[in-house]
Amino acid sequence: MDYIVFDLEWNQCPDGKEKERPDIPFEILEIGAIKLNSEKQEIDRFHEFIKPTVYSRLHYKTKEIIHISPEDLKQADRFPDVIRRFRQWCGEDCLFCTWGALDLLELQRNLRHYTIPNFFPFPLKYYDIQKIFSLTYEDGKLRRSLEFAVDMLEIKKDIPFHEALSDAYYTASVIRRIPDDKLLSFYSIDYFRIPQKASEEIFAVFQNYAKYVSRMFPSRKECMRDRTVVSTKCYLCGKPAAKKLPWFPTGGKNYSSLAYCAEHGYMKGKIRIKKTEDNKGYFCVKTLKLIDEGRAQEIRERYHKKLAKKEPQED
Ligand SMILES: [Zn+2]
């Protein structure tokens, strides 16, 4: 299994948000990638520019950040040709790694814009090295720049940042500093495409929590009426955990709950309801996590506070 570590540089509408093409807010101009074998040794590189067809001028921010000359773009091939070569270069059996979650999102939006079939496996597991760096070296919540990670890990800075190939190279260098068990267990699930039907729904168990991704529902209400969505089955033993608190809103589009498994103890539930990428409906991401008595008490308190606030309105 090879690691494909890739980085994209893109442009946005130079004439402001109003003139942007909503299906392709960011047009990819450059792909850089490093292929690592399972020992994390570099075995190949990919680098190509892409001739833009959506936004003909560079946004001022793009000009400030990236170093692409108009000549490079003029001589480049269009997205469909470059992406075909990139796909071939990746091979069949690979793990995709990027710094942050945006590159995979924008790549899939560009594919959709050109009506190129999405060639990523479904569900798409990927490795967000920015997140995994934080989980390995910091608190798991902070999101640092690639350069920050490179400095902290004392990786030699011998090439400039914000060029697709060099950012892929630095991301690969960070990957080498992350132990295999950490890297492989902290994968992310891409939500660009969501399950189409119940049988495709995603259930993933991680080191200390479990995640479920639902199919699409026409409304938020319908989401919360679905039995699988609201189920709090214990992810370790599979037995139904007794509901200690019902699902209750915790602000925004989130819900919390508390359940208790006779064998494994308290389990905190969290549901986030999201709009699908095509804006046609809603889906939810539920996480279940075993917690101790103290954390359970905090959730109870939050629930009762919510309830106290709500009551006068209902009377
Ligand atoms: Zn259990």
Image (cartoon, helix red, strand yellow):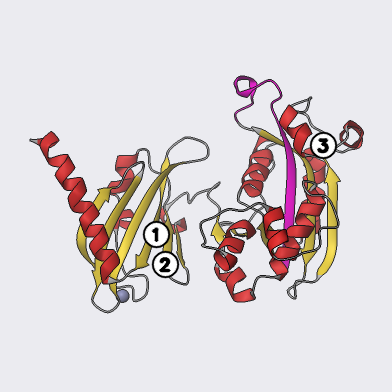
Kindly indicate the quadrant of the structure image that contains residue 49: top right
Q: Residue beneath label 2, please? A: 209
Mark 1: amino acid:
Thr
Instruction: Judge by depth and name the residue closer to the eye, 196 or 244.
Output: 244
- The reply to whether the magenta stretch includes residue 211 is no
Where does the image place residue 10, in percent across and percent down from the top left?
A: 73, 38
Where does the image place residue 142, in percent across and percent down from the top left?
A: 54, 55
Q: Residue beneath label 3, please? A: 78
The span picked out in magenta is 1-22
Neighbours of disc 3 within 10 Å: few (<14), some (14-19), many (20+): some
Say which residue appears at 17% left-offset and 52% top-offset.
304
Seen in the image, is 289 located left or right of residue 17?
left
Earlier residue among tags 3 and 1 = 3
The residue at the far bottom in this view is 263
The secondary structure type at the circle numbered 2 is loop
Say which residue appears at 85% left-offset and 50% top-offset.
47
Q: Which is in the foreground here, disc 3 or disc 1?
A: 1
